[in-house]
Amino acid sequence: MSTKKFMFVNRKAPYGTVYALESLEVVLISAAFEQDVSLAFLDDGVYQITKGQNTEGIGQKNFSSTYKALGDYEIKKLYVEKESLEERGLTPDDLMDLVWEDEDDDWAEKPSIILVDRAEMADVMAEQEVTLSF
Amino acid sequence: MKFTIMINEGPYQHQSSDSALQFARAVLAQGHEIFRVFFYHDGVYNGTRLSVPPADDRQLQKEWSELAIEHNLDLVLCIAAAQRRGIMDADEAKRQGLDADNIIEGFRISGLGQLIEGGIQSDRTIVFGD
């Protein structure tokens, strides 16, 4: 089966609606198809990868640790829009340390998060062949 | 051109299903091919046969069902999303020990891989969602 550039665009907060959780399920399945996968986090979607999520008070599953496993699935391009962070009073330090291991570099851990501004995000999106928006 | 269509919202609550239905009809009218229509999130509610809207309203599930039968379309409900929301075919209902199924003719239930495959096999993947 051929390889295409897939992008999953995450625009909604992790809780409140099911979009983020079910988006992650699609992302994990896409890894099994060995596609060239990227994720985009913008608007409230940037909250999906913030540190220290705690869902005890709302009775929902805290699935934030799943993002840490993405590197193990060879999903290592997580584009995060700077403006979306700034508009919400967030900085890159508020995000989880998401990494992948580079087997060509003695399994060195490398960051998966790629900070881009809005114009750069548009460029990355324009390169994609299949864009699924959640 | 070959299309895969993804529908992420339930009928009536959101226009996603209406817009996708109109898009699908336009695609077929122009002689293009629909490789697959994939229903995800609350979109799986488009596949129930137990919907009874008021008589003067459209019946979206039936419209999808009829379009699928007429054009031999592959309408797929995501199994994980469908199980959460109580949309069952006969096999799945039996497997889960449930007393009823509710899928409408023309749809089938399968995995998320069907969506990814649709993206790979189609020239365009169009998402109808919020």
Image (cartoon, coloured by chain):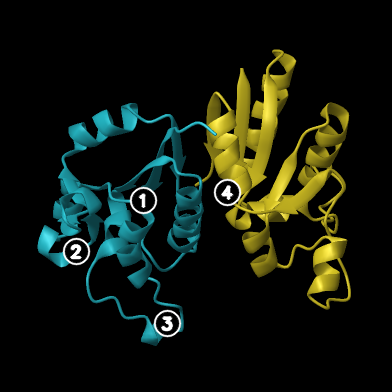
Chain colours: A cyan, B yellow
The picture places residue A68, in percent across and down from the top left corner, at: 30, 66
Name the side, left or right, on which A50 lies relative to B91: left
Name the side, left or right, on which A93 lies relative to A63: left
Q: Report the chain holding disc 2.
A: A
User: Which residue is labeled 4 in the image?
Assistant: B8
User: Which residue is labeled 1 in the image?
Assistant: A11
User: Which residue is labeled 3 in the image?
Assistant: A58
> Label 3 amino acid?
Ile
Secondary element type, mark 2: loop
User: Which residue is labeled 2 in the image?
Assistant: A95
Say yes or no: labels 3 and 1 on the same chain.
yes
Category of crowding for the residue at label 4, using alpha-carbon neighbours closer than 10 angstroms: few (below 14), some (14–19), many (at least 20): many
> Label 2 amino acid?
Leu
Note whether A99 is above or below B59 in the view shown.
below
Say yes or no: labels 4 and 1 on the same chain.
no
Q: Alpha-carbon distance for marks 1 and 2?
A: 16 Å
Q: Can residue B103 be seen from the camera position used here?
A: yes
- Numbered tag placed on residue B53 in the rendering: none
Name the side, left or right, on which A6 lies relative to A79: right
Q: Quadrant of the N terminus of chain A?
A: top right
Of all residues shown, which one is farthest toward the top? B30
Note whether B106 is above or below B99 in the view shown.
above
Q: Report the chain holding disc 4.
A: B
> Label 1 amino acid?
Arg
